[in-house]
Image (tube, rainbow, N blue to C red):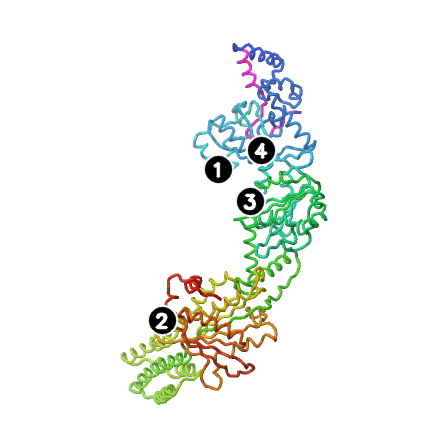
Amino acid sequence: MILPQYSDTPLRIQLSFHKVIEKLEETAASGDIFYSQRAKIILTEVENHPELRDDITSVDQIEKNATIISHLLADIFPEPLTRNEIKAVSIPYQALMFNHTERFKKILQDAGPDFEFNIRGFDEHQIYIAGCCLVLNIFYGTNVDFNRPLFYDIPDVQGVIRHYRITYNADFIDIIPTDKAHTLSQEDIALLLDNYDNIELWKEKIPVNSFIVKGFALISLFDVTVENAVSILKDSLLSNKNSPNMQEELELIFRSIFKIPDIHVGFTLFDQSEDKFANTVLGPNIHSFLLLDKRESEAPLLLCSNSYKNLVTDHNFFAVSDMATFLQNNESSGMADNLSIQNIQSFILAPVVKDDVLLGILEVVSPRPRELNSVNAHKLEIILPYLADTIDRKLSYLQNQIQAVIQTSYTTLHPSVNWKFVREAKNYIQYSNAGETYVPKQITFKNVIPLYGQVDIGNSSITRNQSVKNDLLKQLNQLITIVEQLPQYRSTAVAGEELAELEVFIDDLENGIKADTEQYIQHYLETKIYPLLNDSYDEKLDAIIKDYFNQVDALTGDFHSSRRDYEVTLSSINATLANILDKRQAEIQPFYAHYYERFKTDGVEHNMYIGASITPTQEFTEEHLRRLRLWQLIVTAEMEIEQNHLKPTLPYQLGVTSLILVFSTPIAIRFRMDEKHFDIDGAYNVRYEVIKKRIDKAHIRNTHDRITKQGTITIIYTKSEEEIEYDHYLHILQSAGILGDTIERFDVEDLQGVSGLKALRISVRYGHTIFRQENFTYDELYQQLNLSV
């Protein structure tokens, strides 16, 4: 059998040991007796086999001369290292190898007779370029670095794939040009180095079989199974695609790392906000051995106390080498039961942590005891950082999906209730990934206490009507001046009729403005008056008409100046009130998370709901409710005071009226899917909503006076306990100088469907400056004034 030759390569192989023989001849001629004598003995063996020096042409010649070759290479293949080194004689980039070390022979024996050497990811194009680079470096003296990592993947006796890095030693090779070789200039070499992908150019400059490789190379392998498996794992994890065979691909990698042919790998996601384990985010086909067939489980119920402490609290490995012994010495847990059912006899649970946050649990399991233990668990340390990055990235993607589901099915949500929507969105995504149908459930929170308040801009409707009236009068008077001049230019009875109608409008406006007055007048002007003004008159009147239309512009025209002043006043007050409320709300949320929403109308109103169903991870007490009620009263006073400071800077000097509704009976709220907001749930809770809608216009019983009054805060309640509680709050703020000295007490008139309401009313001291301190917070207020609930 002749030596294998690639048909498409610039190199023709001429296997020879001439360099080693020449070196032995030098040694034999030297004065060192020991080395000289030894070299002469080997040269005597070689003397009758000229093919070893000139050209070995067949595999038979290699086999026939195997002993002599081993003697020739004894210094290169020292006997003491034969069981440690993985080395052989080879031709670069070809599968021909011989004179293997003992360790190399054992590896090949374990791989089996059907194993074939193939360099991973090395194609014919790369082989040709590699041969050319060998020519450039050895024959032309360049320094082209083509030594990218090369690998053999070889199965061991158990079928576990081991990964070996390949290195070549070309010290024993000569490059000899044939008659097909071209002489290359520096320009030719530079052109080749700039055109790696142009194989035709390489073949033109360095043709097929244009050089002879005379000699031999040494190939050495280094076991890089763990490092290479980690690299493959990293590439797999970085991929954005979820392979349908991901479970198998991951298990092959882990089997290489642990040298166990049938271990299995799983992953379980951890939700820190709910202290729960859930199905994986790595892909729908990644199994969770901890959860078995469940979609989720509470962590304290699933894990035993020891494993919970190790994994969740301390973020340490939890390894069990013998399940039978573990079950005898530990209390029963969902984890132990689930793993036993799956015939797992040893396992490692590794916490996947990113920025000190537990993302999930990597599970490595074996059907045999003692194969996995606390010692080999530490092999995972080089893997976990990559896994943590991947899980973190996939969790971010999952969060984007969740938010998309929430936006589609619900709406933008307050953080205090977002967790429940996230749970439903996760269920939707998990069922969808599994090919199942899932309809998001109604979101409800039961047994919550409502808090409602409003700061209303006083006389806002009257002020708006007056601003509209002022602008319309100015506009109509300007039009009358123009229409009166029209008969000078042409005879028309129409102008006289329109003039009379304009004067009627002015008389009507002097008597007051109705809801549709503005729209009616504008429609009349556009259909009756403006067609007259669109004609051309003389230069003077045309200029007056043009000036009129300039003043009609809503953004810049003088005919809308009063309305713009009103809008500036309204938006400035609303912005000030809303900013205070939002800022203070952010401060109070950490005390006890609660639902909060606010609305801008002619003023600002807010709804809040507090209770254990909204914050199930924290115990709810009366202290939390009392603190929130005191907070609401203080922030209402602050809004009153800040609005009063703002008033002198506004076009209209408008004040505000403030109202708080106290309602101590727990209610339920439900997210209305059709309207995308929370509403009262159940007919028995409707009374609260009715009171809310009707109290702001209510009067004091047996009077015509409104229950709200500028410069005061009105508190509506029904129970004597509520009166006592708020008396306490009012006295605290009176002592602080924030509220006035006198508390008014009165009954509220009976409203439709509502009776028995009572009220407290107290003035606000606008001169108080505590809220105007820079970067002031309520925590500082509590400390400075020794406020207590």
Q: Mark 4 points at which residue?
A: 165
Q: Which of marks 2 and 4 is in front?
A: 2
Q: Mark 3 points at which residue?
A: 386
Determine contact: label 3, label 2, CB under 8 Å. Answer: no
- Relative placement, left or right, of 126 versus 514 is right
Q: Callout 2: helix, strand or loop? A: loop
Q: Name the residue under label 1.
A: 195
Q: Nearer the viewer, mark 4 or mark 1?
A: 4
Say whether residue 20 is magenta. yes
Measuring 33% from the left and 83% from the top, which residue is drawn there?
479
Q: Which of marks 3 and 1 is in front?
A: 3
- Coordinates of residue 160 in the picture (x, y in percent): 66, 37
- Relative placement, left or right, of 288 versus 493 is right
Image quarter where the N terminus lies is top right
Q: Name the residue under label 2.
A: 767
Measure how far apart labels 1 and 2 are at the Cα level. Answer: 81 Å
Measure how far apart labels 3 and 2 are at the Cα level. Answer: 60 Å
Q: Which of marks 1 and 2 is in front?
A: 2
Measure how far apart labels 4 and 1 are at the Cα level. Answer: 27 Å
Mark with earlier residue (4, 3): 4
Q: Callout 3: helix, strand or loop? A: helix
Q: Which of 644 and 651 is in front in this view?
A: 644
